[in-house]
C-alpha cells in the first residue's frame, strides 16, 4: 500500500513563473503545490525582475534571484537546516514557493481628495489641492511577504495602491506647512517639493520592503472660489493706480466716440471726462505745491496755500460714474468698489 501511495504521488521537477498579460499588476504569486512534492534536484527558473522565496512550515527560508537553480541541500541551506536534512538527502520534499515581481511600478497617481488647509504668508489661511505621480519597486521579498502579501495566492499592486497613495497625501500638509513658501511661489518650486516629499516618504516605503524610485508634484492649486479671488487680486495689481487707469480709459474713449454714430455726444462725454482728467491733474499739481511738499523745491513759496481745483460739474461726475460702471461690467471693478466710488461721487452733486 505504501508503494502504491508513492507511485500515485506527483512530483515537480520544474518550478517557474511565466508572467502573462493578466499578471501586469501581480506583485506576489504562490506556485500551485496542492499535494505535489518538489523533486530533489528540480530546476528553479527565476527570470529577470523576479525573486523566488521558499517558506517551510510558515518559516521564511531561502531566497533566489534571477537565474536557473538546481534545488539540492547545497542550494537550499536554510531549508536544509530547518528540515534537519543530512548531506545525502535526496528525497522529494514539500515547501511553499512564492514568486515576487521586482518590476518598477510606473505612473502611480496620487492627489488630495479634499483641500489641505495651511497658513500662507501672504493670504493667511488657504486651502490647497495637489496631485502628481510616483513610481516604486519591490526590493525585499522577505519583508514584503511578512508585512504585506502574507499567504495570499496572488497579491496585486491595486491592493496596495490605496495604502501608498494615502501615505503620500498624508505627508503633503506637513511639507507645505514646514516649507513656509507662499502659494504664489509654489509653482516655481514644484520640483523641490517633489524631492523633499520623496525624502519624507522613503522610510515609509522601506517598511513595506519597497523602494520609492521617483515622485513628482505635477500641480498645486487653490479651490475654484479661492482661485477667483486670487485672479481678482492679480488683476487689481496689474491695473495699479485706479485713478491713473481711469484717466487712461477716458482719454482712449474720445477718438472712439468720434468714430461712432452720435459721435458728437460721445465726444461731449469724452470732453467732460477729459475735463475731469485735467482737474485731477491740476489737483495733483496743487498737492505737489503744498507747503509740506514744496520744501526744498525751487520756485516754491513757503506758507503759500495751493489754489483749490474747481469742483467738477454734474456732467463730469455722471460721465465718470458711467465709466466706472463700464469697468465693473468688465470685471475690472467689483460691485462693492463701484458702489463705494459712486456714493463718493454722488455726494459731490450736493
Image (cartoon, rainbow, N blue to C red):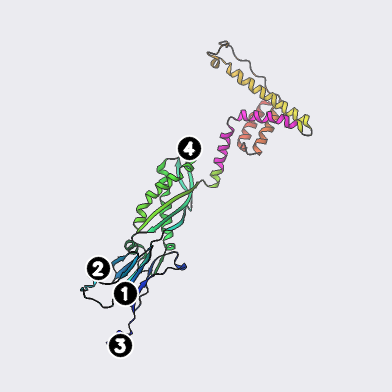
User: Which quadrant would the N terminus be assigned to in this image?
Assistant: bottom left
Please say if 169 is above or below 241. Answer: below
Pair 3/4: label in front: 3
Q: In the image shown, does 199 or 296 lie closer to the viewer?
A: 199
Disc 2 or 4, which lies upstream in sequence? 2
Task: Write down the quadrant of residue 90 in the picture.
Answer: bottom left
Identify the residue at image location x=29%, y=84%.
6
User: Which quadrant would the C terminus be assigned to in this image?
Assistant: top right
Q: Which residue is mark 4?
A: 122
User: Are the two marked residues, 4 and 1, in contact with CB atoms closer than 8 angstroms?
Assistant: no
Residue at the extreme left = 86
**339 sits left or right of 230 in the view:** right
Give residue 68's position: percent from left, percent from top.
33, 68
Q: In the image shown, does 186 or 228 lie closer to the viewer?
A: 186
Determine which of the numbered discs, if any, sits on residue 42 in the image.
1
**Label 1, label 2: how many angstroms apart (C-alpha)?**
15 Å
Please say if 222 is above or below 153. Answer: above
**Label 3, label 4: how many angstroms apart (C-alpha)?**
84 Å
**Label 2, label 4: how many angstroms apart (C-alpha)?**
64 Å
Disc 3 or 4, which lies upstream in sequence? 3
SS of the residue under disc 2:
helix
User: Are the two marked residues, 2 and 4, in contact with CB atoms closer than 8 angstroms?
Assistant: no
Q: Main secondary structure of the magenta part?
A: helix
User: Are the two marked residues, 1 and 2, in contact with CB atoms closer than 8 angstroms?
Assistant: no
Q: Which residue is mark 2?
A: 77
Disc 4 or 1, which lies upstream in sequence? 1
Amino acid at each position: 500500500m505504501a508503494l502504491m501511495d508513492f507511485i500515485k504521488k506527483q512530483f515537480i521537477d520544474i518550478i517557474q513563473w511565466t508572467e502573462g498579460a493578466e499578471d501586469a499588476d501581480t506583485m506576489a504569486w504562490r506556485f500551485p503545490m496542492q499535494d505535489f512534492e518538489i523533486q530533489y534536484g528540480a530546476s528553479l527558473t527565476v527570470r529577470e525582475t523576479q525573486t523566488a522565496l521558499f517558506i517551510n512550515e510558515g518559516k521564511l527560508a531561502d531566497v533566489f534571484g534571477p537565474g536557473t537553480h538546481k534545488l539540492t541541500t547545497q542550494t537550499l541551506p536554510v531549508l536544509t537546516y530547518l528540515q534537519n536534512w543530512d548531506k545525502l538527502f535526496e528525497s522529494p520534499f514539500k515547501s511553499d514557493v512564492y514568486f515576487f515581481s521586482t518590476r518598477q511600478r510606473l505612473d502611480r497617481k496620487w492627489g488630495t481628495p479634499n483641500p489641505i488647509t495651511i497658513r500662507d504668508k501672504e493670504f493667511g489661511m488657504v486651502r490647497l489641492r495637489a496631485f502628481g505621480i510616483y513610481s516604486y519597486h519591490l526590493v525585499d521579498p522577505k519583508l514584503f511577504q511578512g508585512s504585506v502579501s502574507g499567504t495570499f495566492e496572488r497579491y496585486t499592486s491595486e491592493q496596495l495602491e490605496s495604502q501608498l497613495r494615502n501615505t503620500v497625501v498624508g505627508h503633503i500638509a506637513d511639507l507645505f506647512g514646514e516649507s513656509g513658501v507662499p502659494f504664489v511661489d509654489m509653482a516655481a518650486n514644484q520640483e523641490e517639493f517633489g524631492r523633499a516629499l520623496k525624502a519624507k516618504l522613503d522610510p515609509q516605503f522601506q517598511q513595506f520592503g519597497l523602494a520609492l524610485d521617483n515622485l513628482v508634484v505635477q500641480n498645486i492649486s487653490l479651490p475654484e472660489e479661492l482661485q477667483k479671488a486670487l485672479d481678482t487680486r492679480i488683476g487689481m495689481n496689474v491695473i495699479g493706480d485706479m485713478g491713473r487707469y481711469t484717466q487712461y480709459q477716458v482719454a482712449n474713449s474720445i477718438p472712439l466716440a468720434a468714430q461712432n454714430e452720435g459721435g458728437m455726444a460721445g465726444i461731449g462725454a469724452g470732453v467732460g471726462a477729459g475735463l475731469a482728467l485735467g482737474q485731477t491733474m491740476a489737483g495733483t499739481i496743487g498737492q505737489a505745491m503744498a507747503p509740506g511738499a514744496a520744501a526744498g523745491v525751487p520756485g516754491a513759496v513757503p506758507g503759500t496755500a495751493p489754489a483749490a481745483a474747481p469742483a467738477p460739474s454734474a456732467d463730469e461726475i455722471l460721465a465718470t460714474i458711467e465709466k466706472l460702471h463700464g469697468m465693473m461690467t468688465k470685471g475690472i471693478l467689483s460691485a462693492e468698489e463701484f458702489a463705494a466710488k459712486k456714493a463718493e461721487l454722488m455726494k459731490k452733486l450736493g
